Image (cartoon, coloured by chain):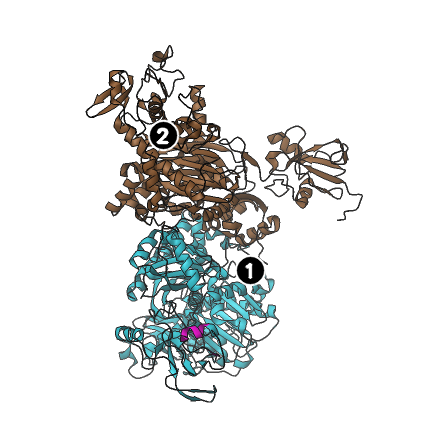
Chain colours: A brown, B cyan
């Protein structure tokens, strides 16, 4: 081939890559030579149609090209056959069929790019570049020849090397067992799924289909929480989430929170094994559910990723979590690791599916926190970001591109409604918003499932089916913050008993006082004990944040990101009044939704992100709350509810939070979406 | 450290490596710096005692050294403790304890070398250098520290890197599950077994013991034959075979020979799976037996190697052998491969044991032939060697260091006694040696289990317990060769009916004649059909050899090696009279015993040998008998029994083979050993 001046000029958009090619060069070949990101599974044989392109004709002064009709070879029978069979958008051509015959500008549409940009629903402005660890390759394999004996596997590898430049591949045993059939059924053409390991070394053939595989392959991203296990199934060819499902974590029967599960393991020789079995069963149930929802064959699930706190991580892997129950909180193993699905008893997936567990940051800051970091990318931020993921333990990350710190703080289960007299899970009928009039001490509220405030006309009718049943986690935050704003409680959290004389809302219960929110079929109130429980929880959270800020040498953060379901529902202003999180401009407090789950999905769709987070995790400085003397000091200080006092200068002026205050905080996370649907 | 002229000179024997070291340098350290092969599992901590050395004092003019008493530091308490506890040979020191204080000559005894030379019992003059894929390393692991969180696994890997320069290790899941316990029980000291993969890349931690592991680790070498499955258990630290066991291959119930098993698989949808299950069960039984014999824990079996013909190889791996039943005889997968024991349902070994299957040469020349090549090393020979492994198929290898050819020839089961009227397996009472007087046509014979000839006085008494029950495979070769030498059969194998008149030994049976060997409780004879069956078998074998010789362009071979149990028992001279193998000086015909099993053991004990045979196999030229037109010609020609004619110039003069003719052929293989024991 000569590239003389007579060779036509080809410009690819949107990349802008350009070059001259001899007349007759297929567009796909030109794209490859220029390193343009144009997909192909069949290697240019007109089978897969992944290489669709749109030629543009006319004068392109920007590109210095005048493209005339006829700059590409004529529409051919392969393209016509494909169009008849599957349809092809107007103006589209197949890059492997259309040949260059004159100067031309060629657009590569998004869906024809290998590294497609997958829009993240949880963050409007961010995308995931699609580049999964397992990818498909179509090959034509040489037939066996008695004169040159070589195994089917050798010839398959030879084809993958020659046709895809994949060298030094290995194959799973099941591939060898099924290879004869696939090659002969496919008339010596097969589609292979190849999994690339760490650092993209040594690919491994994990599945082989006869002929061109018309289907796609899937991956499942799991977020193993102490309370719930969530699974999102993604198409690894498009990056789209095709199904989602969640379950209560069945380990709950062995203990509500992490520490009780660790204790269960300590007390029962088979305890850890029982909990491992339980969570693995839940994983199989979820895989079955998402496969059914997505109408796919479980054999097509070739990848899983997992995130979870260290105890969940260890129990998933069948490791006794007992060492995580006390200092020095040593993980048995915490790096990013790849297993076979069968090693984790995962049966509702391809037997050769590979499982990736994200790295844990430390013995109490897990792979879930690493996933949050991967989703939120504070390591790319100029501003100092505080990321708080509240659960039974709060996992806290602080920093920016220069430095990242992480710790875990024992908030206990109060934020999740446990230990709260009228606490309940977020469900229709649960109070989620509250306002208390500072003068009359009267309460107004909203419940989940109804858009009206309790003093709006028609509220009772609208909530007749559910009633008012309790207080959700987000509601208890607002209730106590509003009680403080209305001076129903003092700075130390004591319910002012002397208000009994002024209002029926405050009433005596033995030696302490409670505040009545609602009198109906059920009496909904906040007791002194409830206030204490929330104080302890929020003090732990705040002290953790403060400890990291001390360590970082800062007095203020630029942004606060609330991760997790809880963070998605609370009112940032109330959280600040309560003293849960450090002072921050309220506009800069946002919800990241289920960022841990998003991180699991990112690792599923982009293998390079696995190396990225493994690398970042080694750079995160872990701060140990349990042994930091200052943590205790901060904790005691943070017990107070400091409205109108330091350290909340920006809130000092707040006397009343408007009904329209951002709650939940901005963000398009899970919580936000659920809410919008509820309101629609 | 400075290496000035004042530093003492240290000479190690037998390597002859020498160097000067500062006073106080431990002998182990000096050995390491010089690259002397001195073992240590504990890394010089006085625990493992693998580094025993013997200092020599006196004048060594050869080495230019005068070694005075006191050239090593004094016997110390570590050495005394070891001696008290386990014993230490007189004159021995521990290399990690004894420090250099003057010029010295230090001998490294064989058992202190890492790469010990293991003497092969099957070949007097050859050794296997011990260098197994799985090796032990003792390490001291840093304790966890809250201030510097890292997982137990990370700290273990760090220790293996710092103390053994093992980088980039990975760990099996079960290691992570047991690591916490092992580290804490061992007070942060553990012994690790590390398996090194192909090309010694990326070691994998496959077992961890608390503290210093006093035991050893084992490997099992399997030879999966169509008829029998044999297993040898070796100590991977010393290379010694500690137990052996064999079983009939339970697949026999699905078909006596290979082709009938392939047919069974074709006719029955679950046929291949049934045969896979059967052979895997046999493997587990054998592992249980060798573990019991060796008094070892099955958990300590960390390696297995397997050889077998292509059908056995595929059935072991769970691959349907159907493609091996017809041209083009395509293997599904045939390279040297590593699996987890669990992938092959091997339960009577450590769950993380690794299995290595030797490469197959072609679709009909299996991993057993590759193992024979590895054991016999024709690729290192100047002379042209013909290696014949006779079974239902004969696998034939011809060549030398410049070129190797291989083929398989369909000899059928006659050599194994099937299709022979009085054929039986080699057992006491079976005829194994025969002589026929050319004049009288009278027969004399010997049976297995008795050293007397049948015409010796006392023979009847000596064989009273067994009787004379039939003809063993080796006996039938001699019988027919002797019949030819005595002119009882002619060149075409026809039993001369006219001899009926001269002797009762020849008698009519319908239209053909038979030869009576023995008249007793059972009548032992050779029928015309028996002669035909052996003619067909030997013609196939000879034609295969001849085809390879044509291909090599030679008319004569320098050496013939008979591999396998059958080869170990036959008389080379009779085989040549019969025309089974090409003409060769009889002294250069030897038995290699169970060379396939030896090859499996070599691959077990030396990982580098795996790469070596994988490399050699790619260089062997495969010759296809089924499509070579000349094979048919050779086959037809070879039907004749050419005594006194070409192509046996060296045998032309033979009229009678002495009783003392070498049978079995020289060699110290299995057969030879069994026989010697029988005679002892």
Q: Are marks 1 and 2 in contact (CB under 8 Å)?
A: no
Q: Is residue B21 magenta?
A: yes
Q: Secondary structure at mark 1?
A: helix
* Quarter of the rendering occupied by the C terminus of chain B: bottom left
Answer left or right for B620 relative to B238. Answer: right
Numbered range of the magenta stretch: B18-32
- Residue placed farthest to the top in the image? A457
Disc 2 residue crowd, few under 14, some 14–19, many 20+, Cα 10 Å: many
Return the residue nearer the eye: B273 or A511: A511
- Mark 1 vs mark 2, CA separation in Å: 93 Å
In the picture of the structure, the residue carrying the numbered disc 1 is: B626
Return the residue nearer the eye: A159 or B189: B189
Is residue B162 positioned above or below A90 on the image? below
Q: Is residue B120 visible?
A: no
Q: Position of residue A53 (x, y in %)?
A: 66, 35
Disc 1 residue crowd, few under 14, some 14–19, many 20+, Cα 10 Å: some
Question: Which of the 4 quarters of the picture holds residue B433?
Answer: bottom left
- Choose mark 1 or mark 2, whichever is in front: 2
In the picture of the structure, the residue carrying the numbered disc 2 is: A642
Q: Position of residue A122 (x, y in %)?
A: 48, 31
- Residue placed farthest to the right in the image? A6
């Amino acid at each position: 081939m000569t590239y003389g001046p007579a060779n036509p000029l080809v410009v690819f958009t949107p990349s802008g890559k350009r070059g001259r090619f001899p007349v007759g060069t297929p567009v796909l070949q030109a794209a490859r030579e220029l390193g343009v990101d144009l997909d192909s599974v069949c290697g240019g044989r007109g089978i897969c149609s992944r290489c669709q392109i749109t030629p543009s004709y006319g004068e392109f002064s920007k590109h210095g090209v005048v493209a005339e009709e006829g700059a590409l070879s004529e529409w051919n029978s392969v393209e016509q056959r494909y169009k008849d069979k599957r349809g092809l958008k107007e103006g589209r051509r197949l890059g492997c069929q259309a040949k260059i015959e004159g100067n031309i500008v060629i657009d590569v549409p998004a869906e024809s790019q290998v590294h497609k940009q997958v829009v993240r629903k949880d963050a409007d402005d961010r995308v995931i570049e699609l580049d999964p660890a397992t990818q498909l390759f179509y090959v034509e394999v040489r037939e066996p020849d008695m004169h040159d004996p070589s195994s089917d596997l050798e010839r398959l590898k030879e084809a993958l090397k020659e046709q895809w430049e994949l060298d030094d591949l290995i194959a799973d045993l099941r591939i060898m067992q099924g290879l004869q059939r696939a090659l002969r059924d496919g008339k010596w053409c097969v589609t292979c799924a190849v999994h690339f390991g760490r650092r993209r070394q040594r690919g491994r053939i994990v599945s082989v289909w006869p002929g061109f595989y018309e289907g796609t392959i899937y991956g499942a991203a799991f977020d193993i929480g102490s309370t719930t296990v969530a699974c999102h199934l993604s198409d690894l060819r498009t990056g789209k989430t095709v199904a989602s499902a969640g379950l209560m974590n069945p380990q709950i029967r062995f203990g509500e929170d992490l520490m009780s599960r660790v204790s269960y393991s300590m007390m029962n020789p088979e305890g850890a094994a029982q909990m491992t079995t339980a969570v693995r069963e839940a994983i199989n149930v979820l895989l079955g559910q998402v496969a059914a929802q997505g109408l796919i064959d479980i054999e097509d699930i070739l990848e899983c990723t997992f995130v979870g706190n260290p105890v969940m991580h260890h129990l998933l892997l069948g490791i006794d979590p007992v060492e995580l129950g006390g200092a020095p909180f040593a993980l048995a193993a915490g790096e990013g690791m790849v297993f076979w699905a069968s090693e984790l008893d995962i049966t509702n997936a391809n037997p050769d599916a590979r499982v990736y567990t994200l790295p844990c940051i430390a013995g109490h800051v897990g792979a879930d926190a690493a996933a949050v970091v991967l989703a939120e990318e504070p390591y790319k931020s100029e501003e100092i970001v505080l990321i708080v993921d509240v659960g039974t333990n709060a996992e806290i990350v602080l920093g920016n591109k220069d430095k990242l710190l992480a710790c875990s703080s024992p908030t206990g289960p109060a934020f999740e409604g446990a230990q709260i007299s009228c606490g309940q899970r977020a469900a229709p009928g649960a109070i989620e918003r509250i306002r208390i009039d500072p003068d009359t001490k009267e309460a107004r509220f909203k419940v989940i499932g109804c858009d009206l405030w309790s003093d709006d006309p028609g509220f009772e009718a609208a909530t007749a089916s559910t009633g008012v049943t309790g207080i959700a986690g987000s509601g208890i935050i607002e209730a106590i913050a509003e009680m403080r704003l209305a001076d129903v409680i003092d700075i130390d959290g004591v319910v002012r008993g002397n208000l009994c004389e002024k209002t029926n809302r405050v009433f005596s219960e033995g030696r302490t006082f409670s505040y009545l929110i609602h009198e109906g079929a059920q009496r909904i109130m906040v007791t002194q004990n409830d206030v204490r429980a929330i104080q302890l929880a929020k003090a732990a959270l705040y002290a953790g944040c403060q400890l990291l800020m001390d360590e970082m040498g800062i007095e203020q953060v630029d942004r606060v990101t609330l991760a997790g379901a809880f963070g998605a529902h609370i009112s940032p202003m109330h959280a600040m009044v309560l003293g849960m999180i450090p002072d921050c401009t309220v506009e800069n407090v946002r919800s990241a939704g289920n960022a841990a789950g998003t991180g699991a999905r990112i690792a599923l769709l982009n293998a390079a992100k696995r190396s990225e987070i493994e690398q970042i995790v080694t750079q995160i400085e872990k701060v140990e709350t349990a042994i930091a003397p200052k943590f205790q000091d901060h904790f005691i200080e943070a017990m107070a509810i400091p409205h109108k006092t330091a350290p909340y200068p920006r809130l000092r002026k707040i006397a009343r939070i408007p009904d329209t205050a951002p709650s939940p905080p901005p963000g398009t996370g899970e919580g936000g979406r659920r809410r919008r649907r509820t309101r629609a």
